[in-house]
Structures are given as structure tokens and as C-alpha cells.
Image (tube, helix red, strand yellow):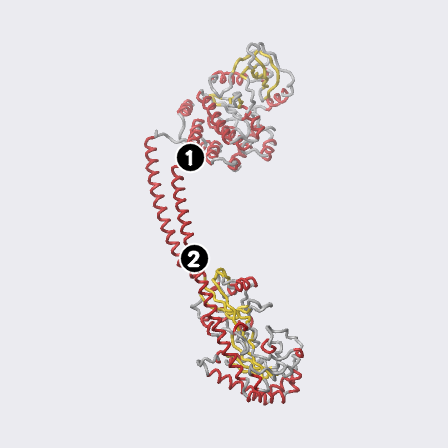
């Protein structure tokens, strides 16, 4: 079924039309004074042929009503009568002649060579928005003219709207039209027919033509009428009778969602869509009550659209100027704030550089004191004697333990050896005496533990300053030849190192950082070789290469016990603090050895947790520059590292080691320890941010005041405009009906 054909009140009439549609090669009849040439189209009541007036040569269109017996003469007379009555209408097709008694009956009207609106929409797919508005307005004018003559079209659709040579619409085919005071039902075309019209008992109403007008507008915008889908067409095709088909049509429209495809047209105005929506309202009371209201709505919409540039100039213009002023003001504030921030950041960076250098120098001084203190301990004859006594009495056990493998019996015998106990008691007394010297500038209070190894690296005795650091897993009897504090190398070697290839350090060394096997804390050790001949302990006398130290004395310190890092443990100094970083090559490069987060860890957490570690990129940036302003603290990634999130301004300085007496200052060796001083970026940005926020608040207040003044002026202008206008009902009010419609209602 083609749903664009007018619905008949009789199935027999539709069948006869289908039969007659096959006769399209010759005109149904010859008309005196006219030459009939070709078929233009066919409809439910007959055929339309193109011809020419033989007297004037004017092209005409002739509509034949085929087979007198199948023609409802009232329809023919009604259509011709209505066309003649509306012959003065600009948008109505003009009637030129009528053949009442001819076989078949016909009438002659002007020929419009542009075809129909349906042909135009089918060829283009859809019309432009401006062309749609023009067409809609002119169709509404023609329809309004017909209504003013008391004629309701009742079958308005694109196929019944012809186009003249100027592409202006002309309303045609008034075969289904009714006078406004008639009560005879009239069926239109599916999807252009109002749902209440699809009823064989419905009385004609102007709202029917309003609905059809909306469907035509929708078709021009979208390319097809509303609600028409393959599923709906199939539902209507399966109806077994005309009343059933009409009922399905009504139910489909009432239950289907509102058409929305016209809203998707690019550049379409919402106001135009709302006019179409109201024309297509399912309930007649929600629709425009007559065509005059549609015309008024279109005119108001076009008038509002025409005034829109003035509104933009009068409202948006001042607002735009204010926004530009605000933009330039904000930009000026931002530029000033950025410049001030850069200067403050640079000052902070310089301050952190100085603090890092100062902290590094402080640490170097403390390390120098520690070097001298530990070296002086190795010159004590009592220590040398006790060490020789232990190594002599425990020679068999030490030879077994030197390979680094477990030897339980040798370990027990070494632990129980009286000479070893005597050596460990000596170390305990010395550590207590050194700790008692706190405050005399010797640095002894920094010591955490002191231990001694033999020439093969086996631990002979150890004592801790804090008894709580002593654990059941004592390092005594274990071989630590792989540790840098024993072999003097830059970093620890693998634990499976061949001990026969390692010799004890031959000079005072600061070991690489290492993690205590007892406490889990990070430590560094100052190690000094113990010589049998005390003169070798002096840097001025170099021992022969074939002379090997008889042992190594190591004093360890917990990282963080240095004075420069004491502020890191203060919970109130989280905005600026110092940290210690290990930058030796390897997997541990960038490990934070001391940090407030580490200070806050308890013993168990420290033993089983990894330490914060900077990325290699961060280390390289800090080493190769004077500092960075966007440092991200790796401690922020830890569960309790929330206090260290965000960006920091950081600078780093390398720590130098004490030089030997034979070295110059430029030859001082460098350690792998770097002092990092970091300051929270937000702490220095806060005053500037507060100042910027205050200036922005002032700007916003000024903007609000100016907008209020503009709004007050515009309210005054609009009030004057309303007072000077002509009052009248709005076309958007459902209750507003034209005087014509009121007359029609009264006549009913």
C-alpha cells in the first residue's frame, strides 16, 4: 500500500481506480479548444493530463473523472465550486473551464510546470530550513484564504501542493474538501491525516488542516511524514477493512512517541521545531486551533529571529565587553602572579640549594670527626691484643666459618670462647665510654653499634648502644666479607662472593648504606683496618703490600641520627625538611635512606617494608641541575605518605669524604650520599594564591554589579517596549481562536 494516497470510504472505488490507472497511453477524451498531450498523474478519482489552449497556447492541466458510473458527482461539483470560489487566491490553483456533461467529466485548470511539492521533496531528500519556512508560510496563507471562504481542505499533502514557475506553492485537489458548517466525514491521506480525522463518523474541523500543515513541514525538514516507518506501514497493510485500518492508524499515532527527527537538522531553531510539534499534537486541544494561529506563530518566530542580532548587540555585546575586560584583568593577574611565583620559587630554590650545601658540609664535618675517632680506637693496644688472642684461639673455627656457609658446631664453639666474650665486653665498655662523651663534639653519641671482624670478614663480636636492637639472630660468627665496610669497595658484593679473593680495607672508609640484618634500619659504617703494627694506623706510614690487616673495626650509625636530619622527625616540619639519598649505581639507586616517613616507622614495619626510591630520571635531574620546582616525593606512594603528596621545590648536594693527610682539598673523594632539601611548593604559593583569589573576587563583584546595571536598563527598555505595543492574546494560548473559527463553531 502506498500510504500517500487518499483513503476512500469504499473499497470498490479504490479497486476501480487501480483498474483505470492502467490506461495511461492515450487521453480519456478530446476537449474542444485544447490539445491533450501527456499524462501528469493519477489519483483516487481520476487522471490529470497536460494540454495546451489552442487559442492562446497557454499550458493547462485537465483533470478527468473516469467512468461516470463510478464518480460521486457531489465530489466533482464540490471541488470545482470551491476552486471557482477561491479563484482570486494567490496560492490556490485557478480553474479555467468545466465539462459537466462530457464523458468522462473533467475540468481545466492552469498548468504548473514545476510539479508538486512531493516531487521536490523526493528529488532533494529534504528542503533547506529557510525554504521550508517560506513554503510553510505560503501554504498556510493559501490554507487561511481557503478557510476564510469557509472551505476546509481535509486532504492536504505534498502531492496536492503544486509549484509555479517561481517555486511558489499552489493548493490543489479539493476533492475531499468540506465547508466549515458541514458534518459529512472526509478522509485524508495516511500520515498527513489527523488521528481524529481517521474516523468515518468524524465531523470536519480546521484542526485537521493544521495537523496536515505540520506533517508537510515535518516532511520538508526530514524527507518523510511523521510516524511513517516500515513497521507501521505493515501494520496498516494487514488490516482487513477500511474501518480497521483507520482504527489502527489512530492507535498507532496515539501510542507512538513524538516525532523528533526534525530536531536533528543541523542549524534548525528550536522555536521552529516547537511550531511543528504543536501542529502535530495528537490531542486537538493541544494543537493550534486554526491556521491563523500557525501564521501568527511563524511570524512571531521570524520576528524574534530577526531581532536576535539586536538582542545580541544590546545584551551580549555589553556582556562580551565585560567578559573581555574580565579576561584581560584575569590575564594581568595571572601574568603578575606567574612572574611573582617564579621569583619566589627561584628564591626558595636558592634557599634550598644553600641549605643542602650547608647540610652536606655539616655531615662532612661529622663524618670527619667520626673518621678520626674510629681511627684512634684502632691504635689501642688492648684491642689489638684481644683480637690476636681470639683469632689465635679460634683459628680452626674461623677457618670453617670463612667460607660463608653454616657450620653449627664451629659457630657454637666460637660463641662460647672466653677470649671472644672478653673482646665483646671490651667493645661494650668502649661504646659506653664513647656514648658518655655526648656533647663534647667528638660525634661519639651518633654510634649505634660497634663490631669487629677478622681478616677474612667473620664477625667476632658486636655490641649495640640500644639494647632493644639486640636480637636473637646475632651476626657473630657470620661472614661479612661481601660488605663494603669490610672490603672497602664502593658497594656491597654478592653474598656468594669467593672469600679468598677479598681482602680487608687498607684505609678508613665510609661504607655504602646497608640495611641492618638485626633491626631492618638503614645504616652506614665507618670502618678502619686494625694493624698488628700501630704505626701503620697513621696515614703517614704506608704498610707494605704483603702486610694484611689482622681485622676491621666498624662503628655503625643509624641514618637519621645526624644532626642535619633531626628536623625530619619533627611532625610539625613537614613543609620543609632534609633527606638523605643513596645514588650509587645499581638497583638501590635513588633510595631514600632517611626521611620523615622512615622515621615514623616502627621496628617491625621497618624490617619488612621497602624504602621509598626515586626514579633514575629524578636522580639525574637533581644531579644535573641546581634544583627542580616540580619534584614528586616517592614517599607519597606509600600507605602513610599522604603528607608528602604534591609538588616540592628540591635541591640536592653531594657529600664529600674526609681526605687523607697526603691529599689536597681538590682531591677529596666523593661519597654516594647526597643531601636532599625539599620544600612544599604549595607553602610558598599559598600567599600568592590568596592574593590572586582576592583580586579575582573583586573582579567578580565588579562584574556582577555591571551585569545588574545592564539587566536593570534592559528591563526598563523592555517595559517601555511592552507599554508602546498593541496588546492582544498570544498565539501560543490554546484558548485563542480566530473570529472565523468562532463563527464556524457558532454556525454548527
Find residue 301 and report its image quarter. Answer: top left
530 or 464, nearer to the observer: 530
Count of numbered circles in the view:
2
Apparent side of residue 542 relative to residue 734 in the rendered image (left or right): right
Q: Quadrant of residue 226?
A: top right
Callout 2 environment at 10 Å: few (<14), some (14 to 19), or many (20+)? some
On the image, numbered disc 2 is attached to which residue?
341
Residue for point 39% across, 42% down: 321
What is the secondary structure assignment of the residue under circle 2? helix
Q: Position of residue 742 (x, y in %)?
A: 40, 25
Depth check, front residue: 560 or 40: 560
Q: Is residue 220 above or below residue 578?
A: above
Q: Quadrant of the N terminus?
A: top right
Q: Residue at x 32, y 37 (%)?
A: 716
Q: Based on the displayed image, in which of its 4 quarters is residue 12 positioned? A: top right
Q: Looking at the image, can residue 37 be seen? A: yes
Q: Is residue 91 above or below residue 284?
A: above
Q: Residues within 10 Å of mark 1 (few under 14, many from 20)?
A: few
Query: On the image, numbered disc 1 is attached to which residue?
Result: 309
Q: CA distance from mark 2 to mark 1?
A: 44 Å
* Image quadrant in which the C terminus is located: top left
> In the image, which is nearer the foreground, mark 2 or mark 1?
2
Residue 516 to residue 341: above or below: below
Q: Write the residue at 59% across / 73% down.
A: 490
Residue 136 horizontal/vertical position (percent): 49, 28
Marking on residue 521: none
Element carrying mark 1: helix
Residue 443 x, y percent position in the rendering:
48, 79
Earlier-in-chain disc, 2 versus 1: 1
Percent position of residue 427, x then y: 54, 85
Instruction: Confirm whether residue 255 shows in the render.
Output: no
Amino acid at each position: 500500500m502506498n500510504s500517500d494516497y487518499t483513503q476512500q470510504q469504499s473499497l470498490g472505488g479504490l479497486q476501480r481506480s487501480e483498474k483505470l490507472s492502467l490506461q495511461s497511453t492515450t487521453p480519456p477524451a478530446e476537449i474542444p479548444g485544447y490539445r491533450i498531450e501527456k499524462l501528469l498523474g493519477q489519483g483516487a478519482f481520476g487522471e490529470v493530463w497536460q494540454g495546451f489552449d489552442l487559442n492562446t497556447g497557454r499550458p493547462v492541466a485537465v483533470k478527468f473523472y473516469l467512468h461516470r458510473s463510478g464518480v460521486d458527482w457531489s465530489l466533482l461539483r464540490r471541488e470545482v465550486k470551491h476552486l471557482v470560489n477561491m479563484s482570486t487566491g494567490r496560492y490556490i490553483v485557478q480553474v479555467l473551464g468545466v465539462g459537466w456533461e462530457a464523458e468522462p467529466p473533467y475540468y481545466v485548470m492552469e498548468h504548473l510546470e514545476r510539479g508538486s511539492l512531493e516531487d521536490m521533496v523526493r528529488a532533494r531528500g529534504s528542503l533547506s530550513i529557510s525554504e521550508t519556512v517560506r513554503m510553510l508560510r505560503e501554504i498556510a496563507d493559501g490554507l487561511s484564504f481557503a478557510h476564510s471562504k469557509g472551505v476546509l481542505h481535509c486532504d492536504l499533502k505534498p502531492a496536492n501542493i503544486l509549484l509555479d514557475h517561481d517555486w511558489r506553492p499552489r493548493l490543489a485537489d479539493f476533492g475531499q474538501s468540506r465547508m466549515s458548517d458541514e458534518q459529512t466525514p472526509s478522509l485524508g491521506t495516511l500520515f498527513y491525516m489527523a488521528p481524529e480525522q481517521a474516523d468515518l463518523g468524524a465531523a470536519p474541523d480546521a484542526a485537521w488542516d493544521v495537523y496536515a500543515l505540520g506533517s508537510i513541514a515535518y516532511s520538508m525538514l526530514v524527507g518523510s511524514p511523521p510516524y511513517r516507518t516500515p513497521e507501521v506501514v505493515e501494520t496498516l497493510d494487514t488490516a482487513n477493512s477500511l474501518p480497521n485500518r483507520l482504527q489502527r492508524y489512530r492507535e498507532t499515532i496515539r501510542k507512538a512517541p513524538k516525532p523528533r527527527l526534525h530536531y536533528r537538522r543541523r542549524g534548525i531553531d528550536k522555536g521552529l521545531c516547537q511550531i511543528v510539534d504543536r501542529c502535530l499534537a495528537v490531542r486537538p486541544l493541544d494543537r493550534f486551533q486554526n491556521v491563523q494561529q500557525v501564521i501568527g506563530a511563524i511570524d512571531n518566530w521570524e520576528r524574534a529571529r530577526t531581532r536576535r542580532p539586536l538582542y545580541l548587540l544590546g545584551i551580549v555585546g555589553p556582556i562580551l565587553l565585560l567578559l573581555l575586560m574580565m579576561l584581560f584583568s584575569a590575564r594581568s593577574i595571572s601574568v603578575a602572579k606567574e612572574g611573582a611565583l617564579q621569583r619566589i620559587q627561584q628564591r626558595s630554590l636558592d634557599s634550598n640549594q644553600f641549605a643542602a650545601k650547608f647540610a652536606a658540609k655539616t655531615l662532612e664535618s661529622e663524618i670527619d670527626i667520626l673518621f678520626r675517632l674510629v681511627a684512634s680506637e684502632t691504635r689501642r693496644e688492648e684491642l689489638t691484643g684481644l683480637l690476636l688472642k681470639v683469632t689465635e684461639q679460634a683459628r680452626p673455627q674461623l677457618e670453617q666459618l670463612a667460607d660463608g656457609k653454616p657450620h653449627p658446631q664451629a659457630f657454637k664453639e666460637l660463641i662460647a670462647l672466653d677470649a671472644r666474650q672478653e673482646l665483646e665486653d671490651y667493645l661494650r665498655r668502649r661504646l659506653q665510654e664513647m656514648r658518655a662523651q655526648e656533647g663534647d663534639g667528638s660525634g661519639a653519641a651518633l654510634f649505634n653499634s660497634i663490631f669487629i671482624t677478622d681478616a677474612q670478614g667473620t664477625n667476632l663480636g658486636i655490641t649495640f648502644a640500644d639494647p632493644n636492637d639486640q636480637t636473637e639472630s646475632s651476626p657473630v660468627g657470620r661472614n661479612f666479607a661481601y660488605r663494603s665496610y669490610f672490603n672497602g669497595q664502593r658497594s656491597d658484593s654478592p653474598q656468594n662472593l669467593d672469600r679468598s679473593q677479598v681482602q680487608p680495607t687498607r684505609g678508613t672508609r665510609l661504607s655504602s648504606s646497608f640495611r641492618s640484618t638485626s633491626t631492618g634500619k638503614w645504616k652506614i659504617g665507618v670502618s678502619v683496618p686494625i694493624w698488628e703494627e700501630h704505626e701503620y694506623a697513621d696515614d703517614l706510614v704506608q704498610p707494605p703490600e704483603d702486610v694484611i690487616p689482622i681485622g676491621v673495626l666498624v662503628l655503625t650509625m643509624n641514618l637519621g641520627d645526624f644532626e642535619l636530619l633531626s628536623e625530619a622527625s619533627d611532625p610539625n616540619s613537614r613543609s620543609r625538611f632534609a633527606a638523605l639519598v643513596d645514588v650509587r649505581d645499581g638497583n638501590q639507586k635513588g633510595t631514600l635512606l632517611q626521611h620523615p616517613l622512615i622515621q615514623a616507622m616502627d621496628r617491625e614495619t621497618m624490617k619488612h617494608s621497602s624504602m621509598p626510591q626515586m626514579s633514575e630520571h629524578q636522580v639525574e635531574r637533581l644531579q644535573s641541575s641546581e634544583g627542580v620546582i616540580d619534584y614528586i616525593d616517592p614517599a607519597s606512594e606509600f600507605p602513610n605518605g599522604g603528607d608528602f603528596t604534591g609538588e616540592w621545590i628540591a635541591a640536592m648536594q653531594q657529600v664529600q669524604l674526609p681526605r687523607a693527610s697526603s691529599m689536597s682539598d681538590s682531591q677529596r673523594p666523593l661519597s654516594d650520599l647526597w643531601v636532599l632539601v625539599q620544600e612544599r611548593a604549595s607553602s610558598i604559593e599559598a600567599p600568592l594564591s590568596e592574593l590572586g583569589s582576592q583580586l579575582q573576587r573583586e573582579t567578580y563583584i565588579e562584574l556582577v554589579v555591571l551585569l545588574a546595571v545592564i539587566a536593570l536598563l534592559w528591563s526598563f527598555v523592555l517595559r517601555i517596549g511592552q507599554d508602546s505595543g498593541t496588546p492582544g492574546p498570544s498565539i501560543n494560548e490554546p484558548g485563542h481562536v480566530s473570529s472565523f473559527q468562532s463563527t464556524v463553531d457558532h454556525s454548527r
